[in-house]
Amino acid sequence: SGTDLGDVTKGTTLQFKGTVADNLSLLDGGNGIVYLVYLDLSSGNYFQGPYDRIQLGDGLTYDFDLDFDVPNTLVSGDYKLFLRAADGVNNISDAVEFDMKIP
């Protein structure tokens, strides 16, 4: 179970900030990314959220600031959000999970 964001109104902007760290350069092999995927728990459908290309930093860490504008088209119900990072060779981090409810 993830961090509970509670009731989230459609059109709200959720802001995710943090630091990605790797033992090798995040830029090796291409551009790494930080990205958000969300799941409608009632339908089982996944949706691609925003992403941020890793372009700066010292190569081993990257500070991100990712905004997610909650779509006005979401149906009411429960959702799970997965925040992940991938380095330039597509090694993918474990997800940081969040739960939200669209009233």
Image: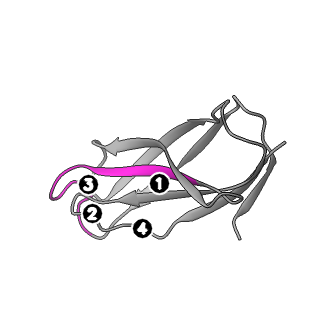
Secondary structure beneath dot 2 equals loop
Q: CA distance from mark 1 to mark 3?
A: 12 Å
Q: Is residue 37 magenta?
A: yes
Residue that mark 2 sits on: 90
Q: Which residues are magenta?
A: 24-38
Q: Position of residue 46 (x, y in %)?
A: 54, 55
Residue that mark 1 sits on: 19
Q: Given the image, on which type of amino acid does mark 4 rest?
A: Ser
Q: CA distance from mark 4 to mark 3?
A: 16 Å
Which numbered circle lies on residue 93? Answer: 4
Q: Earlier in the sequence, mark 2 or mark 1?
A: 1
- Image height check: is 14 above or below 23? above
Q: Earlier in the sequence, mark 1 or mark 4?
A: 1
- 31 or 56, which is in the foreground? 31
Secondary structure beneath dot 4 equals loop
Q: Earlier in the sequence, mark 4 or mark 3?
A: 3
Q: Given the image, on which type of amino acid does mark 3 rest?
A: Gly
Q: Given the image, on which type of amino acid does mark 1 rest?
A: Thr
- 28 or 47, which is in the foreground? 47
